[in-house]
Amino acid sequence: MSGTALKRVGILGVGSYVPTRRLTNQDLEAMVDTTDEWIRQRTGILERRILEPGEACSDLAIRAARAALEDAKLDAKELDLIVVGTVTGDHAFPATASLVQAAIGAWNAAGFDVGAACPGFIYATSIGTQFIATGRYRRVLCIGAEALSRVTDFKDRSTCVIFGDGGGAVVLAPLEDAKRGEIVEVSLAMRGGNPQLLWLPAGGSRTPASHESVENRQHFLRMAGREVYRVAVETMVGMVRDAVQKYGKDEIALVIPHQMNRRILESIIERLSLDPSRVLINIERYGNTSAASIPLALDVACKDGRVKPGDTVMLEGVGGGFTWGAVLLDF
């Protein structure tokens, strides 16, 4: 492909899905030593959506995929690639992407999962953009989906009040076909070395499942709240500041951040002196849905009219690893 001009890439369709079951703060009061007031003050969350028994991550991804395909007016057989950002797939293998492919009938598509935690959708979008930009593929389905309730310890009040389940998706295509949501810029980063700050201790090859790991509740996610808070604020502030310096604060119509914690998002707004109306926050309705939170919020923003033609929109997220990334879109 040397010397070949890169194609411009845009969004052909957007979709999302959340389970019907609501887990409210009042529900959690009956499950763990907490209160509605405590949860609101520390997270800004009022409720989160939770899978029903028997449901799994792929169910969320499939429904979000179908919604995005409907919005794109595209048959699944026209897809060339499926990339799913998730850390709560149905199985260690096969990939959740393969389950999505079979369910929607995308028989001409290749696919794989990306385990980048909360910015998983950003990473998936980056991959899809490059495949289309180089001319290798023309239709790529990028999904962020998480079933965090399946790995949440509902005896740990510091984590069980935060997380929820959901899925979101976009269909990418060459801009001449998409005609909206041009991917202007993508940035990815990672700082490894401290997995214990936000991780799932057991179930992998380092600590295989055992009676001891189950008894010690090591198959539930664990988080060092204060350190995660500090890293999240620093990295997300840095990403927005870089974009503001490059494009100008008035040029960014809407920032759609990963919905990790309302206090973190408000801290970012304050430190950068942003107009709160230009930062989308919907964590009160869905909780922290990790890789699903950004595409879910993007879909809501598009359907609610918060994203208009001519708007420059920034997507950004940071999560376990630590990984982080941002996408700049021109609608």
Image (cartoon, rainbow, N blue to C red):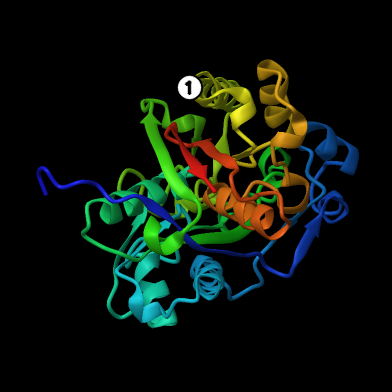
Residue 16 position in % (x across, y down): 60, 64
Crowding around mark 1 (Cα neighbors within 10 Å: few <14, some 14 to 19, many 20+) is: few
Residue 153 position in % (x across, y down): 63, 49
- Which residue sits at x=79%, y=38%? 44
In the image, residue 278 sits, relative to residue 23, either above or below, namely above
Viewer-closest of 34 and 166: 166
Residue under circle 1? 246
Q: Is residue 174 visible?
A: no
- Which residue sits at x=50%, y=37%? 319
90 on left or right of 262:
left
- Which residue sits at x=32%, y=43%? 206
Q: Is residue 321 visible?
A: yes
Count of marks, rendered view: 1
In the image, residue 79 sits, relative to residue 122, either above or below, namely below
In the image, residue 256 sits, relative to residue 154, either above or below, namely above
In the image, residue 201 sits, relative to residue 55, either above or below, namely above
Can you tell which quarter of the image residue 149 is in? bottom right
Viewer-closest of 48 and 218: 48
125 on left or right of 260:
left
Can you tell which quarter of the image residue 10 is in? bottom left
Viewer-closest of 236 and 59: 236
Query: In the image, what residue type sits under mark 1?
Result: Lys
Residue 46 position in % (x across, y down): 82, 48
Where disc 1 sits, the SS reads helix
Residue 56 position in % (x across, y down): 54, 69
263 on left or right of 325:
right
